[in-house]
Amino acid sequence: MRYEHIGKDLFIRNREKLKAKMKPNSIAIICSNDIMPTNADGTMAFRQNSNLLYFSGIDQEESVLIIAPDFPDPKMREVLFLRETSELIAVWEGHKYTMEEATETSGVSTIMWNEKFESTLNTLLAETDNIYLYNNEHIRNGSEVETRTDRFNKWCREKYANYEFERLAPIAYNLRTVKEAREIELLQTACDLTDQGFRRILEYVKPGVWEYEVEAEYLHEFVKNKSKGFAYTPIIAGGGNACVLHYIENKDQLQDGDLLLMDVGAEYANYNADMTRSIPVNGRFTDRQKDVYNAVLRVKNEATALLTPGNSIPDYHKEVGNIMTRELLGLGLIDQTDIKNEDPEWPAYKKYFMHGTSHHIGLDVHDVASIYTDFKPGMVFTVEPGIYIPEENLGVRIEDDIVITEDGHHNLMRNIPIEVEEIEDLMNS
């Protein structure tokens, strides 16, 4: 892999946490993702199933992990199945895991080639009552694509219809919500790479540069530092494009006097950063831009202070709405009449700040977790308020990634320039 060795201890510990949550005489089966097609014989870059990564560290297609904590033979309580390589595969696709490498990566001692999967599964199921299968239960999932996991689940439920099936997703999501120290280290690396990219951009941006050129500068910085690239499709939005929340065309030329909103993050070892910064294309904020920027920054700082143990997203978002309302009043964008007449389901502040302030982040950019779970140490959130004023061709969003700690929080992006004066100094140095 491009990234440095993570270490098997993380994955051993993750499997132990899973075993403690499983019913007696159960097995859990977790499949890799497909290599997704494009057109003709083309494919997308491979992106591993986050749960298989979380429990094994194996970053390769056609892999399956079985966990059977109560099986009588200790050697069969964890079994990892891999695609067997060959000279032809090595020539065309490159190196694949050997059994020894898979053990060193995952900590799983028993490695088998995929040809032994079905016979081994039959052996394991002879001593099993329950089968845990994973389904994508993310609340934002709307995909109509049938995945490798979907196909396997369908096959498994038909072939072993007499067994009791259990949902793996609630257990996996609950475990993944609170990060281990090693995971936070990997997230910090992703954030540090994002910092390097942003500093590069501060030296590069000027009137006449194109949005896609900015995108290319980020990608160069990320990839040369062992990242696969962007954690998600980047938003590079100059002027009024910043008021389109999911603007990803990145096709326009940057104009003198505009702000440039950049929602960008680096990936590292499949962990993701998620940063937004808004900078003046010509290196200097106008007074109005500065007022709006500092209003957003104050909301971000006050929202960050609320990311502490015991709070929850519904209560948190309600309070952030109150903070944003105060700032919009100060900017003259809303008035007391707007507030008095507001729809409680769509408060007045939503006209200029229409999205949520925070989401979980980790192996997935919008990481898996219940929004109703109280904040706990080890959870990692974005904090990303924004103000969008289409009539002024102006949009500002500022975003950092925050770890909840025992006594408050820790900002993984604390070193990324954020103050008006710091940004202007770096752009004009």
Image (cartoon, rainbow, N blue to C red):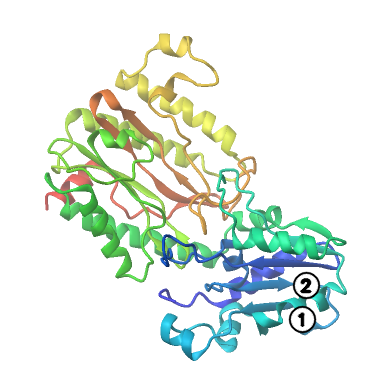
Q: Is residue 392 visible?
A: yes
| Quarter of image, res 25 | bottom right
Extreme residue in the front direction:
40
User: Splitting the image into 4 quarters, where does residue 378 fall?
Assistant: bottom right
Q: Amino acid at mark 2?
A: Ala
What's the mark number on residue 293? none
With 407 as the anchor, is 200 left or right in this view? left
Secondary structure beneath label 2: loop
Task: Give whichever of discs 2 and 1 has the lower sequence position.
Answer: 2
Horizontal side, residue 382 vs residue 236: left or right: right
The residue to which callout 2 is attached is 68
Please tell me how crowded label 2 is: few (under 14), some (14-19), or many (20+) other residues with Cα within 10 Å. many
Q: Is residue 420 above or below residue 189?
A: above
Q: Which residue is mark 1?
A: 76
Q: Position of residue 199 (x, y in %)?
A: 24, 56
Q: Is residue 249 left or right of residue 310?
A: left
| Image location (x, y in percent) of residue 195 | 31, 57
x and y percent of residue 75 in the render?
A: 76, 84
Distance from label 2 to label 1 (Cα)?
Answer: 7 Å
For mark 1, give the secondary structure.
helix
Classify residue 69 by image quadrant: bottom right
Q: From the top left corner, tell me how far across and down residue 388 is, in percent.
A: 33, 30
* On screen, residue 172 above or below 293: below
Q: Residue furthest bottom?
A: 87
Q: Residue at x 44, y 25 (%)?
A: 350
In the image, taking residue 345 as reference, residue 288 lies left or right, namely left
Image: 330 above or below 254: above
Which amino acid type is shown beneath numbered disc 1? Met
